[in-house]
Structure formats: C-alpha cells, structure tokens
Amino acid sequence: MPDMRELYQEIILDHNKAPRNYRKPDDANREAEGYNPLCGDHYTVFARVDSNQQITDIGFEGVGCAISKAAASMMTSMVKGKSVEEAERCFENYRQMITGGKDYDRDALGKLMVFSEVCNYPTRIKCAILCWHTLHAALNNLQEPVTTE
Amino acid sequence: MITSAPDKIAPNLNDFDVMRVRQDFAILNTLVRGKPLVYLDNAATTQKPHQVLCAINQFYGCCNSNIHRGVHFLSEKATEQYEESRAQVKRFLNAASTTEIIFVRGATEGINLVAASYGRTFLKEGDEIIVSAMEHHANIVPWQILCQQTGAVLKVIPMDDNGDIVMEEYAQLLSERTRIVSVVHVSNVLGTLNPVKRIVQMAHDAGAVTLVDAAQSIMHMNVDVQDIGCDFLVFSGHKLFGPTGIGVLYGRESLLEMMPPYQSGGDMIKSVTFEKTIYNDLPYKFEAGTPNIGSTIGLGAAIAYVQSVNLDKAQPHEDALMAYATQRLEEIPGLKIVGTAKEKAGVISFVLDFAHPHDIGTIMDSEGIAIRTGHHCAQPTMQRFGIPATARASFAFYNTLEEVDVLVRGLEKVREVFA
C-alpha cells in the first residue's frame, strides 16, 4: 500500500495552503474553464501569450481539493516564461508520469515529479491533471469548458 | 454428563446483537490497506450477508433455468423461487397484492418506468410535477425529460437551512394543476427523514398521484405502502443487503392497470400476431424479457434476512449510532455537519474547514475507512447549501460505536496532514 504521506508531500500541502499565481492577470488574453464533475473541482486558467508565443504571465482561480489546487499552483510556476510549445511538451511529460507511463522526461518535470505518486491513486489522477487540460484549452483557444468526465 | 442451562447460554433472541449480525458479513472482517475495514458507505450500497450469497449460489448451482415458460423440473423450480421473492416483497411492503410488485433494475428504473408509462400517457402541457429540493438525480432527471416531452412543468419544494422540507411552501405549490408529487423518503445526502405520509395525503387532497423514493429508507425502517398511502414506491435491492441489478416498483393496481407497457417483448404478452398483441396481466405486463432471476431470488433472501434481524429491534442500535456519531463529529473543531433535520436516518454529511472532501476521502481510505465524498448525485442539494461536495458517513445496523471512534481518529489524521 502506498504511503499517504507520499501523496501529500510538504510541497503539495504548501502550494495548497498558499497557491502561487492565484489571480487573473490584468492583460490575460487566453482563458479556459475546467471542471471535474465527480468531485466538484472547478478552475479557470488565465494566460498572457505574446506574439512570440511566449507565456509571459499566467494565473488561476477556483475551488477544489488539495491535489488539484497544488497541481494548478505548481503548473503556473512551471510554465510561466516558457513558450507555448514548451508548455505543451511539459503537459505531455506530466500526463505520462501521472498515468503511470514509463517514457517521459523526468528532468524536464523537475519539481512536478512530486506528483508521481498520484499514479498509485487512480481516483485522484483527474484531480492532478485537470489544470493542465484547462491550460491546454486556454492556449489553444478552445471554447468548450474542459471536463474530466 | 449432560447439563443444560438454556437461560444462560442461549442468545437472547429478543435483543439485537450487532456482533452476531456482523458474523453474517465476512467482508466486514477483512483488511483494507492493511487496516480492519470500517465500512461507512452504506448509503451507496450495503454489504451482503452470506445468506444472500448462498441463495444466489444455490439458484445458479441447483435450479438455474428460465422462468414462466419451461414445463421441465428446473424451470418450475426457478419460477417458484422467483415468484416467492415477489410474495416476500409484497409482505415486506404490506402491498395489497403481488400484482402490485414489479421487478426492475433498481430505484432509478422504477422512477423512469412511472415517468415514461404513466407520465407520457396522462400528463399534458401545463400540468405540474412536484419534487423536493433534496432529490437524488434519479428523482429529478426522469421528470425533466417528461416535462420536455409533454410540456408539463417541474416545481420544487424548498427546504430550510437544516434540510427540512418547508411544508407551508409545499402546500402553496399544490393546485389542481399538480399531477404527480415525487419525493424522497430519506435524503441520501442530508439524512432527512421526510414526513411522506403527510406529503402523500396533501397530494391526494389536491388530486395528484404520488411516488416515494425509498432507496435510502428501506434499510433503516419498515416501509408500509398502505400506511404511507402512496401510489408508487421504489427501492433498490443492493441497498437492502441484496444484490445489484434488482429493484422494486410498487404500484397501486388500479393505476398499473391503466398504464401502457414500459418495455415490450417476451413475457409481457398473452398473444402476438402481426396484426395485434394482447398484453399480459399484471405484474408481467411490465416485465419484458428474461428478468434478473438470480438477483431476484437474492433479494428474496435479503428480505428474509432483514426480517430475521428485525429492523424494529435494530432501531435502538441505529439511533445510538447516529446520536453518538453526531456528537463525536460535532466535537471536532472546524467540522460542520450538513443536514441537521429534526428526524434523520443513517446518513451524516459533513465538511471540514481545513480539508476538501476528496482529500478527506483519500486519507480515510488509507486508514481502511470507506466513506463517500463528492456531490452524491444530488447537485441541486449541494447548490442549496453553497458547497461543491461533502464527505458522508452512512451507517447500517452492522456498524458499531467503535467504528465511529475509528472514523473520528481518521479525521484527526486529516487534521495532522492539513492543519
């Protein structure tokens, strides 16, 4: 049995308590809504993407469990200042990691490796990936709200 | 030498003995995540005693056959057992006749049957259907679809901040336009025990037909359809210590007679030609196709089991569980119980101000404690209380006060992690 403390590591608890980039940037030009109907997690992700396809600012708002909130907070810290393409690559690595895949770039994920334990909790995978799907939708200007169902 | 002291060694059959009852449920003695299982998710589904498992096994092992058609020995046996289950349900609900007992997949299918068959036949534009604000989606969506199909209008009885139906508002909603009143007996989120007898009486005074969703109440109390006076009542077998995939629709015979079949095919007919089909009599008119015979027999065994345990005798124990759990939970700083109705049964929903329900659920699971978290298929109830989700502990007669203590210790663990 995986240890529950491995799931709720200090860094996750810290980002849950004091989420970074928890705001709507004034000049945001991308926005998408994500919803997990099963547990009620509900977030909006905002981003400012410049003409060079760089994410110059990013933020999020909403409600949800510790895993979903910490994932959103750490995601925004990770992709801020990166290009859209880099962010999408990061999403793919992250998705591989939390769904138990083997073929992903650990170094590129850096601190996000703290979520690697999530793959042992199948019911929590959706919590950890909701914000990333929402970011993907925002970056691609998808109009429909994202749901994990 | 043989000595006997029956008064001292024989169990007192007049008392409810939770430890004896627990012996019938092997799963309650298993380990989960290396910890003894504490099963507090009974509102989702109850565990099954070995008497039910044996009955299902015995049917498939010794009597398996189709019913109502074969002339051979096994078919006769299977038909006999299937119809005996119907007779048991009839006695259990105190229905007037076995023709009023329709086997369906569960409470959900029972409500859908009434909405589709009665509703589409007898409702028209401008008619009104009343439900309460605390309904499960299964007692909302079928009526919404019926409204779309017929032009009828769905009305909702509000509830107060405790989770009690506001009866004055209900009285205001009733009118000559009211055609159906469909309410839950016990709320699966709030635990509220609704005054269904009074609700039904008021609906009948207004000329409406009534449906009671007994999915949650059936495991906690004796449900008597003639005493309640309702026209329809539904429940699911798996919430009565029986198997999944089987449930019951009780319907007043005079109404069932007027209603067209819900599904059609084999078994629900008397004769078929390409020109004309004559439908079968009740209850078979509503049981098209080969039914879930094994689970129906399992349900019969579950009812026999519940009657042997005796819900009246288990009542003081269940009341003690609810009272003790409520008291212990209220002592936890930062915990708020959602649903504080005057009368409750079996269910305690709560939120913590330092942890989200989903995180509570995961940490409880790591302690071997099974609770439900989320919106419990009652999103309007969540909206009414302005919360996205709750954690829910729900009890059956086999739970113990010690398990309540484990629940409370689990919540202390949540505090250690999050506070």
Image: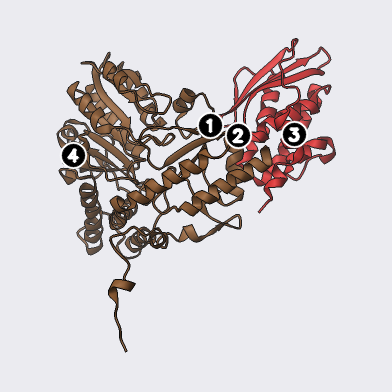
Chain colours: A red, B brown
How much space separates mark 1 and mark 2, taking CA atoms?
8 Å
In this view, B146 is above or below A106: above
Structural crowding at the residue carrying mark 4, measured as other residues with C-alpha within 10 Å and reported as few (<14), some (14–19) or many (≥20): some
Question: Foreground mark, 3 or 4?
Answer: 3
Question: Foreground mark, 1 or 3?
Answer: 3
Mark 1 highlights which residue? B389
Front position in the image: A114 or B98? A114
Residue B226: assigned label: 4
Label 3 lies in what chain?
Answer: A
Front position in the image: B174 or B276? B174
Label 1–label 2 contact, CB within 8 A: yes
How much space separates mark 4 and mark 2, taking CA atoms?
43 Å
Q: Secondary structure at mark 3?
A: helix
Horizontal side, residue A26 vs residue B247: left or right: right
Mark 2 highlights which residue? B356
Q: Can you give x and y, in whole percent of width and height, for residue A16 in the image?
A: 70, 32
Q: Secondary structure at mark 2?
A: loop
Structural crowding at the residue carrying mark 2, measured as other residues with C-alpha within 10 Å and reported as few (<14), some (14–19) or many (≥20): many
Label 3–label 4 contact, CB within 8 A: no
Label 1–label 4 contact, CB within 8 A: no
Mark 3 highlights which residue? A14
Residue B126 in sight in this render: yes
Q: Secondary structure at mark 4?
A: helix
Q: Is circle 3 on the same chain as circle 4?
A: no
